[in-house]
Image (tube, rainbow, N blue to C red):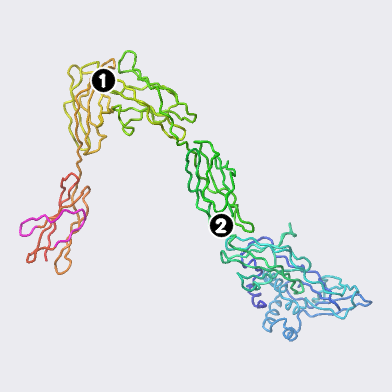
Amino acid sequence: MRTPLISLATLTLGVTFAQTQTAQNTSTPARPVPAKTGLATLPTPTGALLRWALPGAGLPGGYRLIREGGGQSVSRDLPPLADKATAVKAGWISADDYDALKALLGKPKLAPGQALAVQLQVLADPGLARTLNLLTEDAGLKAGVSYSYRVQALKGGSVSDLGRGTVTPGPTPPVPVPGPLSGKASLGRADLAWTAAGGLTVGYRVYRAEGDAALTLQQPSPYFPTTSPKNPAAPVSLADERLTRKATYRYQVSALDLFGREGARTAVLSVDLRNGEPLPPALITRAIGVKGTLELGWVPATDPRVGGYLLYRGLTPSDLKPLTTLPATASAYTDRSGEVARSYLYALGYVLKPGTDAPGEPGRPGPPTQGRAINAVAPAAPQGLSATLPPDGSTDGKLHLTWKANPESDLLGYLVLSAATPESPLGEMAQLTPQPITGTVINLPLRAAAGSNLYYRVQAVNTSGVASVPSAPVSVRLPESGSDAPVLGRLSAGDGRLTLGWSYRASAPASVEVFRQSPNGALTLVAHLPGSALEWSDTHVIPLLPYAYLVTTLNAAGKRSAASNVMSGTPRYLANVGSVSGLSVTSVTGGRPVELAWKPAPEAAAYQVFRTVNGTPLLLATVATLEYRDTPPAGTGGASYRIVPIGLDGMSGEGADVDWRP
């Protein structure tokens, strides 16, 4: 269908299919053929078709066509517009469009956009070209004889050449067929490309169908491709957007030449937009070290384009290299080639099935996952553990522990443990080294009361973090020496604290140490104080749990006394229960029952609800909510209610009162 000419005047002409589809913005304008001057010829068996362009934006006074050849020279003049009746009868144009065209081109000057729109519409519609006498036929010529033509524009007594051309009547050549049609799918879009048809081609007609529907011409038509002066031989491209995602589209393209002829269509091209859908990231979800190997796992892709996986491995994200190729059905892989206990990064890339595609680079590695092979076999328990006190037998030096080195090749180091008894389970041992040490010798400070028995053990740890069973224990008894033992005479409990008080049998020592004793007898040094101190408070305690303590003294030489007696106590929890606020009472129906509601007290664990009738209080309930429903006895003239907050320790806070009247 021809675009109404009124759209030329208002510039609503859709210039190209691609511009309508993609709203391209390019600095290179469409370049229709021929240029604004020039004469194109096309042979026919008995003559020629002749075509030229408007000589500017408006209409000239007319055209003069001069032919030479065959032994004669012929000249004929053509008006700038064909006769209206002739043009309408021939179907070149409608009567309304004829009047609009005449009015538009009768203006002294057209805006640049209007002038371009006219040129493109004339190129797209041979009927308009014939109406404007820009396309005409010269018949009755001799086949095989060469003729030359010259066309001139006539205006105001002046004559200007528009173009020259030659033609030899004979078989009319067909319109060239565009080169092979290709397409690439992206998200809801098909990018088409083909080799330019060449010759007198000025545009293309694009046919499209979704699924199995019939191919239909896409509007507006024809499509005038954009060309680059730097690369005029570049393939013609077209972006068809706003398509149904995951649908299949079929395309054909044909060329349209200067004389309005359409050539044969290309072969049908099918574009499957599923190939334009992005693939989900290939993500390894499981990396578990098992017996010197690493087991990898992932959820298999369900996309039909996936034909397999590329598994990558490396030490850093930039170091990932293909390790193996796996089928699309694979969901796991066991790596047996890595070094035990060495951390690797693993990632997956996709291998697509032949004939399918996906945006980006599907074969590149996806997000990496870290894993390492684990040696789950525990090392042997260390042997030959021995302990040596300082030479003089005092307790102010270092305890010297030694043991034999383990034979395992993947050993990370050793952990040194202390225990309260030789039979203490592993869970009750204290770890003296935060991290495994590589040597087989360690000097430990002696933090225990004189006369205490100390027990030590050692564990071997491999590079996978698997530890051996503890070694056989070694024991050390600290000698009782130094000043007399102090007397622990007082242990008082406070809010989240325990306070100890002691006395000395003789003069004050150089310093005093406070030990906390665990249920199994193990001692932990919790304070080192000057000898003048006679009191200390432990604030690092949990309320309502029991604790036991003893103290020892050290003389100026650093020798410890025997331990004091043991005392125990339980820190208190004094909650700030606070007060109830916002107490209200509301009658539900008929004056009974009534609903009580209040705001929480700061540290209340429960609330007591009291009702007083005729001066007699009654505890109704203890609740953990902030509301309560009650039905007062019938016949009463009213009641008073009181809400009292209760803390965790049973202490009560400040209550609130409210009166109710029926």
Q: Amino acid at mark 1?
A: Ala
| 513 lies left or right of 147 | left
User: In the rendered structure, which segment of residues is drawn in magenta?
Assistant: 612-630
Task: Note whether 148 is above or below 426 in the view shown.
Answer: below
Nearer-the-camera pick, 659 or 649: 649
Which label number is shown at residue 450?
A: 1
Whether residue 516 appears in this view of the structure is no
Name the mark on residue 278. Answer: 2
- Residue 251 marker: none
- Secondary structure beneath disc 2? loop
User: In which quadrant of the rendered view does residue 231 lie?
Assistant: bottom right
Most frequent secondary structure within the magenta stretch? strand
Q: Amino acid at mark 2?
A: Pro
Q: Position of residue 244 (x, y in %)?
A: 56, 66
Name the front one of labels 2 and 1: 1
Q: CA distance from mark 2 to mark 1?
A: 74 Å
